[in-house]
Amino acid sequence: MLRINKTIKKTIAILLAVMLMISVVACGKNETNEGGTNNNEPAKEFSIEDLETEVTSDNVAQYDFSDKAMKYLEYIGKNLAVRVMDEDPDDNKHDEAVAWIKEELIKAGYKDSQIEEQKGECDYGKISNIILSVEGKDTSKTIIVGAHYDGDGCGDNGSGMALLLATAVGLVDITPYYNIKFAFFDAEEVGMEGSYLFVENMTEEEIANTAFYINMDALSFGDYANIYGGNAENLDNDDESDDLLGAYNLAVRIGQNLGIKVWGPDALDGYFNEHGTGPEIEDNALYTNPWTKNNKAPRNHWVNSPATIPASDHVPFDEVGIAYVYFEATNWFAAGNDEYIAYTGYYETYDTSLGDGGMFMNTEYDTWDNLNSYFPGRAKKHFEMYSRLLSALLMVK
């Protein structure tokens, strides 16, 4: 998740409010033109609400790649912990992470021709997005799933890249109905520069033929496993059309069909005002941003449920009208120890004695050892839900 510079925490409210109204300036020009499948076929009549998945409660176990994701997360946490692009510390493994991702995809059975390294530049250095393209039975639509690999955390976003890689490897022998692009984005921590680069280089046809985008960021540390969706500005104006919330609604419906309990905006609306805290955390349950126009956050109310703040790689897709669903584990009910980011989802746990007042992302506390010391078994539980839901979303028709 987009990093917080500790020296500007006092201005975070203003910055995030502005981000809701304008686009983040994207980085420089692309050196290669990737980002979507060029379709020769005319676009077919398509509606997200009509989609069904091939993954059911009977076969879902074979689409659960959480064990592989945990192995990848451990490897990342122990060997690729620092993957920053804007600094050059002695332990920086940014380039090693790029090579490792590509090696794992090739080892799984993907061809070199399916893997492209989309390059560009921004103020912080050279960008390297890794894009894996999988052709579906119906090439008229493409589903894009992305997670940023840059950063200096195990949770943020070693967890997202681990699940993305595990899913790509797990589905290597399965032909999806629609095209899939697995996008390992660079430079998220410095302004979503990698995902902006990707979207800027999509053609109008590719944008129109994108079914939806799935974003995964910081899946492991948070008290609550969440899903988000919808355009923040339109939700503020009470526009809840399927065009804006279609991917989120699809994820909710599929999750419930797979036996996952979903606490949506209706269930969470006013819960904090009545109870002074969030719901008891349940196994096999997904939550969302609880704040609505009628029941706002106690402080820092910037976005209405089920959308989230514009601080991850869903933003460039949302800005061009591509519906998204976003996986993230955090705690919107936690006040932490800094009033300027209280109740915004930056604090991942109620316990202010852990991490930086309950925050691990963007801090030195975001490590493999801390994840297992403070929250044993949590990452695996989150991966089990997210992995099954992700596979089901990728296998729609």
Image (cartoon, rainbow, N blue to C red):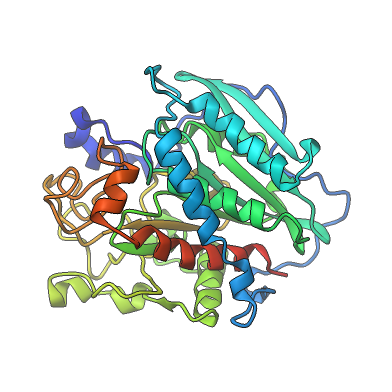
Q: Position of residue 104 (x, y in %)?
A: 64, 41
Q: Quadrant of residue 14?
A: top left
In the depicted structure, whether residue 377 falls above or below residue 94: below
Relative to 50, is 382 on the left or the right?
Answer: left
Q: Quadrant of residue 116?
A: top right
Residue placed farthest to the right in the image?
A: 40
The N terminus: image quadrant? top left
Between 9 and 364, the residue placed more toward the observer is: 364
Between 68 and 337, the residue placed more toward the observer is: 68
Q: Position of residue 152 (x, y in %)?
A: 37, 33
**Residue visible at 44% across and 30% down?**
83
**Residue visible at 32% across and 79% down?**
267
**Residue visible at 25% across and 40% down?**
365
Between 91 and 286, the residue placed more toward the observer is: 91
Between 196 and 113, the residue placed more toward the observer is: 113
**Residue visible at 79% across and 52% down?**
135
In the depicted structure, whether residue 121 falls above or below residue 50: above
Relative to 186, is 371 on the left or the right?
Answer: left
Q: How many marks?
A: 0
In the depicted structure, whether residue 131 falls above or below residue 119: below
The C terminus: image quadrant? bottom right
Q: Position of residue 24 (x, y in %)?
A: 44, 34
Relative to 222, is 200 on the left or the right?
Answer: right
Relative to 383, is 270 on the left or the right?
Answer: left
Q: Can the viewer see residue 72 in this picture? A: yes
Q: Can the viewer see residue 215 in this picture? A: no
Q: Position of residue 53 (x, y in %)?
A: 66, 73
Q: Quadrant of residue 329?
A: bottom left
